[in-house]
Amino acid sequence: MFFSQTQIVLTGTLLLGIVAGMVGTFAVLRRRALAGDVVAHSALPGLCLAFLAFQSRSIIVLLSGALLSGLLGAVTVSLLKRFTRLRDDAVQGIVLSVFYGGGIALTRSIQNTHRNDPGADLESFIIGQAATMLKGDVLQIAAVAAVTATIVVMLFKELKLLSFDEQFCQVQGWSAMGLDILLMLLTAVTVVVGLPAVGVVLTAALLIIPPAAARFWSDRLSRMMMIACAIGGVSGVTGTLLSARYDGLPTGPLIVLTSTAIFVLSWIFAPHRGLLWRSREVTDLEMYLPWVESGDTVPPASGPHVSAQEVS
Amino acid sequence: MTASAKNKTLTIFDIHDMTVAYDRRPVLWNIDLTLRNPGLVAIVGPNGAGKSTMIRAAMGLVPMVSGAVSAWGSPIASQLARIGYVPQRGSVDWDFPISVFETVLMGTYGSLGWFRRPGRVQRDLTMQCLERVGMQDYAQRQIGQLSGGQQQRVFLARALAQQAELYFMDEPMAGVDAATERIVFELLQSLSEEGRTIVVVHHDLRTVPEYFDEVVLLNVRIVASGPVDTTFTSANLQATYGGRLSILDTMAEAVQKQKETE
């Protein structure tokens, strides 16, 4: 079968958006949103070292290196947290920038020493280059998406419990640590397969923004996750189409901007949790004023509207 | 020996030589505690005495420096299916996208095991547990839309759904309204009448003699433990709280009065 380059890229970014929305939902709800960012930034030096060690630009080699150093970054975070008493955000900031700094230095030195080798341009991984995505890259993303979706569906009950109440999860005899590591692995693998398209700087946005937007639309985890996947997928496709339409604009940033636009719209217009809806609630609250001023300890049982009528 | 006679000789719950430290500062020191009789057990003590830490360490949520915890004669890790837990209300994110019903349903997950999804049996049980705490009408609400007392009742319903024989509850009466407090105590009493053991971290000394069978007075070490009648004395309370609380005098009077009327 033949696909046009745009179709290949579209499939890739669509699947990437979906799988990132899926694992990102857990990351955001567990307040681990930045963990994905740490993995992404920490992946860069590993990617470079893999290139140097194997002198190969094969995507499997590069991404294996990226995954290893990304996980090393995540492990470093938990070790530093345990042994320095620093807070989460400080530790993540340190690890993320140190690994990233090392990675940038390596990409430059590789470029300098491999002047005549166009394949040595690893800087494309910094903000990504979706337009050059190959069928093999898309198959990789598809494989990761399939495995992740299977695991999430099969362990949905366990992952939900872990995300909501880790202690209760543990007290019921589940291995909270095992599930935690599993989620971390799924996140890391998703981030790493997203690197060629979106780059180390922006991959975390794919994990965070769609679930954050989806939260406005639902009070149920399963539905929130499906909405996050949809927003991720739509952002991937829209970003890709925009970047194809306006030549020269990179895909990754456009995907992130699209999902951010969806986030802002959700924030304003979503029922119940959106800005407009909440401003209406504030006017409703004003109807409680007569009760507040009267000093009664029991609020009017039949709701604000009735009480307002009674007062008038 | 018949099964019931054998059960009587078994201890329900035992902590041996437990020491717990945060940053090398001991918060619990050489705790030895044995519960032999089913019933309601209160753990009381001043702030920072390690009350919550004790039950959390017993269930393996906090690492111990030393010690061993067993239930029904076996290491507690192997008995978790028979143990229920009500954590402090502040320990979860109440903005989490989950309904009251789904939260209580989580109590049945332990008996389901890996991969299996809750079915009709678990759903019916969940509804019964919600009815038992008077929260059935709120089943489809998102948990953040409840008052503090209602949230506490949801946690209790979830523990009921665990169908445990031994319960640990961390301040289930903290910051709840009078109606919830009454419901909670009635529930604890009916659980106790069913032959279960409920260990409650408790902050309100006044209600201890009224509701509990046994009391554990804790301040880093165990000051005293045993039946409320013989253990909940002013001397023991002084030793636990260091005689700083003015409430102790009133407590002493109350205890005295109760003794006189008996």
Image: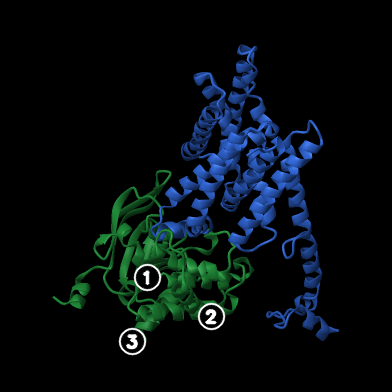
Label 2 sits on residue: B134
What is the CA distance from the residue labelled 1 to the residue labelled 3?
34 Å
- State whether discs 2 and 1 lie on one chain: yes
- State whether discs 3 and 2 lie on one chain: yes
Q: Which residue lies at the image location 53% right of the left edge and 34% below the top edge?
A: A70
Subunit of mark 1?
B
Tell me the blue chain: A
- Give the label, 1 or 3, closer to the camera: 1
The kind of secondary structure element at disc 3 is loop
Label 2 near label 3: C-beta < 8 Å?
no
Residue B77, above or below A11: below
Callout 2 amino acid: Gly
- State whether discs 1 and 3 lie on one chain: yes
Label 1 sits on residue: B164
Residue A288, above or below B61: below
Label 3 sits on residue: B262
Q: Colour of chain B?
A: green
